[in-house]
Image (cartoon, rainbow, N blue to C red):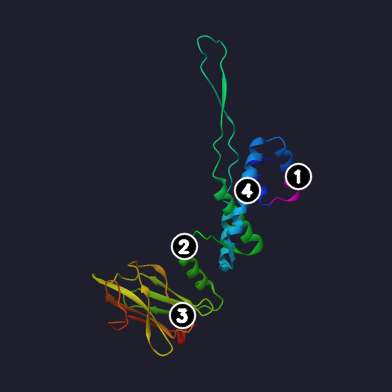
Amino acid sequence: MNDIHALTGAYAVDALDAAERLAFEEHLATCADCRTEVSELTEAAGLLTELVAVAPAPRLRSAVLAEIDRVRPLPPLPSITTTSVASTERDEPEENVLPLRRRPVRAALVAAAAAAALIGGGLAITQPWQDEASQQLSAADRVLAAADAEEVTLDFPDGASARLVRSAREGRAVLVTHAMPAAPRGRDYQLWLQTPDGKMVDAGLMPDRADQTVLLTGDASRATGAGITVEPDGGSPQPTTEPIAFFDLSEAG
C-alpha cells in the first residue's frame, strides 16, 4: 500500500475498512513513528467529547465531500540522522539521532473527526472556543438554509439590491446586499425589526460594505417587517428618518 504512514489519522478515528485496518496494523507492528502518532491521535480524540453536535446546513455535507479529495495528510517525518566530525583523538565518526519534531496532530484530528462525523452521522461540530464572528456566521447560514426560510427582495434604482431572509424556526433574520453604496459620511445604516404592534426595534448596524451578509440582532420569529434607515454615526434608539428600504414580511415567500 502506497504511503501507508498517511493512514494514522484514519486508523485513530476508526475510519479504515477491514482490509486497510489489517494492512495498517501489520505495518504498525514495525513502525515506531506510526505507533507514537496513533497514540497521540487517540489521546487527542478525547477532545471531541467536549464538542457539541448541532444540525448543520444541508449544503455543508456536499461542501465537505467536494473538498475531501483535495486534502491529504502528510506521512510521519522520518528519523533524522547526522554524523558529527571526528575528534582529533578518534578516527571513527559518531552518529547522533536527533529527536523528531512531532506535527501538531491534535488540531488535525479534531478537523478530521469532525469531517467524519459530518459524512457519517450528518452532524456539524460546534467548538466551544469559537469566536463570536464564527458563531454569527453559523447562525446566518442556518437561517439561509432553514426549511421555513422566507424572503423579500428589493431592487434600488442605482442597481443595488437587498434580500431579507427570515426563519421563524430559527427566530432570526439575515440581510444579504449587493452593490450597496456606503452610508453618507458621519452616518450609518441601521437595521430594524417591526413588531406586530408596529414598533420598530433596533436590529444592529450595517458595516460599510457593498456586498455582505448581515445577521440581524433580536427575535425575528414574529416580526412583520424589517427596515433600513440612515442614522447618525453609531445608531439611534429609535428611527430618526424614513426607511430607505422596508421589507414587508407579510409578502415573504
Q: Name the residue tied to disc 3.
A: 220
Residue 43 image position (x, y, % from top left): 63, 48
Q: Amino acid at mark 3?
A: Ala
Q: Of the residues tagged 1 and 2, which is closer to the observer? A: 2
- Write the start and end of the magenta stretch as one range: 15-23
Q: Nearer the viewer, mark 3 or mark 1?
A: 3
Instruction: Please tell me which residue lies in front, 143 or 2.
Output: 143
What residue appears at the point 60 percent right and 39 percent down from the top-left corner? 76
For the N terminus, give its image quadrant. Answer: top right
Label 1 SS: helix
C-alpha gap between disc 1 and disc 2: 40 Å
Dot label at residue 43: 4
Q: Position of residue 204 (x, y in %)?
A: 37, 74
Give the residue displayed 28% in from the left and 76% down from the top. 231
Q: How crowded is the residue under tag 2: few (<14 C-alpha within 10 Å), some, or many (20+)?
A: few
First in sequence, mark 4 or 3: give its number. 4
Kindly identify the amino acid type of the residue bearing the numbered disc 1: Leu
Magenta: main secondary structure: helix
The residue pinned by badge 2 equals 134
10 Å crowding of disc 4: few (<14), some (14-19), many (20+): few
Q: Earlier in the sequence, mark 4 or mark 1?
A: 1
Please tell me whether mark 4 sits on a helix, a strand or a loop.
helix
